[in-house]
Image: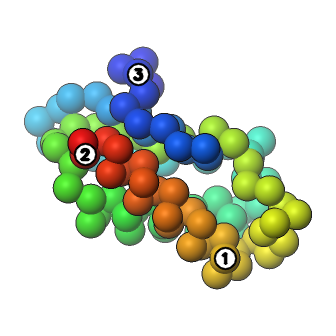
Amino acid sequence: MAAGIAARTAHFALHRMPQPDAAIGVVLPKRWAKRAVTRNTIKRQVYSVSEAAPLPAAAYIVRLRAAFDRAQFTSATSPVLRRAVRAELEQLFAQAAA
């Protein structure tokens, strides 16, 4: 993460370090996603979106940097939360690819 932030959205930051082979990691602190089911849902979304994203070969870390509002997303793994996470991750990877 010392390489700096390559892209950022309201809830996520994408760190990139140049390497010859591609790798992706996810950092989801309990501070921002208290429920394990929410953290697992976000991880699945990150890996799914990253496979489809046209990113240059590098090591990437997606870091959750803010909590999703529990008043808006009452269920730990609702379809509404999944759509919001996916849309934001697509935006994050599009910024990084540009």
Q: In this view, does 49 lie to the left or right of 17?
A: right
Amino acid identity at mark 2: Ala
Query: Disc 1 versus disc 2: distance between alpha carbons?
Result: 26 Å
Callout 1 secondary element: helix
Residue 86 x/y as whole percent:
50, 66
Residue at the far right in the pictured view: 71
Amino acid identity at mark 1: Val
**Residue occupied by mark 2:** 97
Question: What residue is rendered at 24% in x and 42% in y?
Answer: 98
User: Which quarter of the figure is the N terminus placed in?
Assistant: top left
Amino acid identity at mark 3: Gly
For label 3, count other residues whose C-alpha is less than 10 Å away and answer few (under 14), some (14-19) or many (20+).
few
Residue 24 x/y as whole percent:
34, 48
91 relative to 2, above or below: below
**Residue occupied by mark 1:** 80
Callout 2 secondary element: helix
